[in-house]
Image (cartoon, coloured by chain):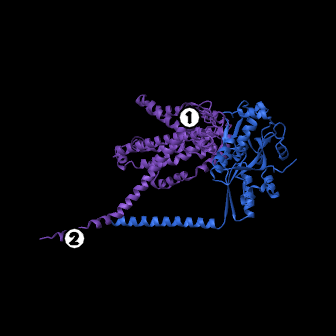
Amino acid sequence: MLSTQQDTSLLMSRRARVMARLPAFVGEAFLFVVTAAGALVILFIFYYILRDALPFFRARGFREFFTGTAWYPSAKPPSFGVLAIFYGSGMVTVAAITIAGPIGVAAAICLSDVVPFGIRQAAKPSIEVLAAIPSVAYGFFALVVFAPLLQEHGGPILAVGLLLIGLPLALLSAVVAGDLAAGLLPQRARAAGRGSIAGALALAALAGLGIGAAHLAKVQVTSGTNALNVGIILGIMALPTVVSVSEDSLSAVSRELREASYALGATRAETVVRVVVPAAGSGILAAVILGVSRAIGETMVVWMASGNAAQIPTPWYNFLAPVRTLTATIAGDMGEADHVTGSERYSVLFAMGACLLVFSFICNLVSEWAIRRSERRSA
Amino acid sequence: MRGKTGLLWIAGLAMVGLSLCGLWTVRAAEQAAAAQQTTIVVDGSTTVGPVAKAFAEYYMQQHPDVKISVSESGSGNGAKSLLNGTCDVADMSRFMTPAEFRAAVETGIYPVAQAIAMDGIAIIVHPSNPVHGLTVAQVRDVYTGKIANWKQLGGPDLPIVLISRDTNSGTYETFETQVLKGDKIGGGAEYVGSNGAVHARVESTPAAAGYVGIGFVDEKVKALPIEGITPDAGTIASGRYPISRPLFMWTNGYPKLGSHVFSFVTLYLTPQGQEIVKKAGFVPVTNYR
């Protein structure tokens, strides 16, 4: 016969149960509060920026802001046309991602699939050191070293850049085109045909590149603080981000996938191009988008070295003209814009900040979607 | 359960450690305040900045218990700091606008100016530029974009690279009032953030033209005579040089006699102060001719 006394002595009393669970509960609650605080900060940033941006749109409307090109905030009467500034931001971001995207992804592929593991272990942290250099140091370099260099030797630098990018591309395309063309020839002539066609195409491409380089070398750069200068420096700044994230997603492609491809007889190049890169495609896209966010949000470099001229360059593709970006305008005009003395001038900076926020938000959402899609695919 | 207890111990110790650090910092700050150290915060113009820094060094040598910090964020920012109460002395290379005055008085600040030196705005070009001099009207045409190539002024066939200061700057405001007279600067002009940056750009670009305070003119750039008058101490002090202006230090109300702020802002009246102003390249206000 069991008494209830005996039964309950094996269970903890209610009070004892609560006391035992209390430290865990307090710890979890504390962590939840900290996480919620972080999320709340983002919401507050959005709220305060939008709140201070709305008075401008209420007073001046949307048309002038988004379609006007005259940026004269201190004139009487002031004009707040931000289109030229949007264009400037876009130009330097395009230049930066044109440099950081291909080079970054190529470096990531090289690190994950080509070089031995030891070299990868050494090289990846060294590339990430580039991200640790303060942006004002980059800006100072761009203003004091790179701008005079562009002014004195701009033509040759452009020519060398063209050759650096153009030579590998030209040789590769010549070989591929020769191969494809030789496929059309009869069987006997195929091997000789491949060699001669590829050789002829390569010579033609080299000649074209040579003429192009000679033309570029004659270009005179009158002002070294321009969109090209900033684009190159921003590309170098975005490079470690792109390389790091792409390399992570390329390494995350499972070993079985690569082994299966080799087992089917594919060469290393075919495996990388046909199997690994498509499998890591969403991750690489996320890396490039992160690079774009980095480039468009950069302030110090563009403030010091982009020339800050609020104009759309005369041929729209002229990267050798000075441009002005959203971030530099906010940094430069903040001193004069006091919410007491000139409220439109103050609110327009917040409006620009809101545009930057929205753009970064969209970039983040797209990269999140891409990563989520790649996880779902590989799962 | 054991893992969680360990983590909680660490979290608890961390919180205790952080609060101790906080208490220690507060105590150190109170001690510093109790040690009677005066801090003077100076902010504002990049033109007046070098003079303010030289004044600060000299004054701190004379009075080791005073700490003066000088920042250069532009005349506009200096006025804003004075209005917000975040600085004691605002350097400005222009007078306060009526709007700034009104805002100050409404917030309870009564700005009082000391004209500590006189300055001229020199139009500088690269030393290789053969142009001999310009009139004020020509400078205005260059900056509004009507004259776009140096060959129209007797120079080489190069498009003019215009360097201007950003709208934050007192130098820009003075240039706008005295030279541009309200016209807008042309679209292709480049904007930089300080006198030093204008100097760096003009020094390295043969086709550039810019404007700086005369304290920033050295042998690496060429200052053009305007209306035939070269900017120097005599022409600026007598007002003959067309683009000249006083440099100001602003305080909230007249500084209390005998206080450190008073001695700092009236340093320009002493012989040593005038030497410092002259060494910085500006003209002492007492340079009567």
- Pointer 2 residue: A9
Please identify which colour was used for chain A in the image.
purple
For residue A142, which numbered disc appears in the image? none
Q: Is residue B144 visible to the viewer in this orientation of the structure?
A: yes
In the foreground, A373 or B12: B12
Q: Residue furthest right?
A: B289
Q: Amino acid at mark 1?
A: Ala
Q: Secondary structure at mark 1?
A: helix
Q: Amino acid at mark 2?
A: Ser
Q: Secondary structure at mark 2?
A: helix
CA separation in Å, label 1 and label 2: 75 Å
The quarter of the picture where the N terminus of chain B appears is bottom left
- Is residue A276 toward the left or the right of residue B124 in the image? left
Picture quadrant of residue B255: bottom right
Please identify which colour was used for chain B in the image.
blue
Instruction: Chain letter for mark 2, please.
Output: A
Which residue occupies 73% across, 46% down?
B93
Q: Position of residue A280 (x, y in %)?
A: 41, 44
In the foreground, B222 or A22: A22
First-in-chain label (1 vs 2): 2
- Pointer 1 residue: A59
Q: Position of residue A223 (x, y in %)?
A: 67, 38
**Can marks 1 and 2 be said to lie on one chain?**
yes
Picture quadrant of residue A315: top right
Q: Position of residue A73 (x, y in %)?
A: 63, 37
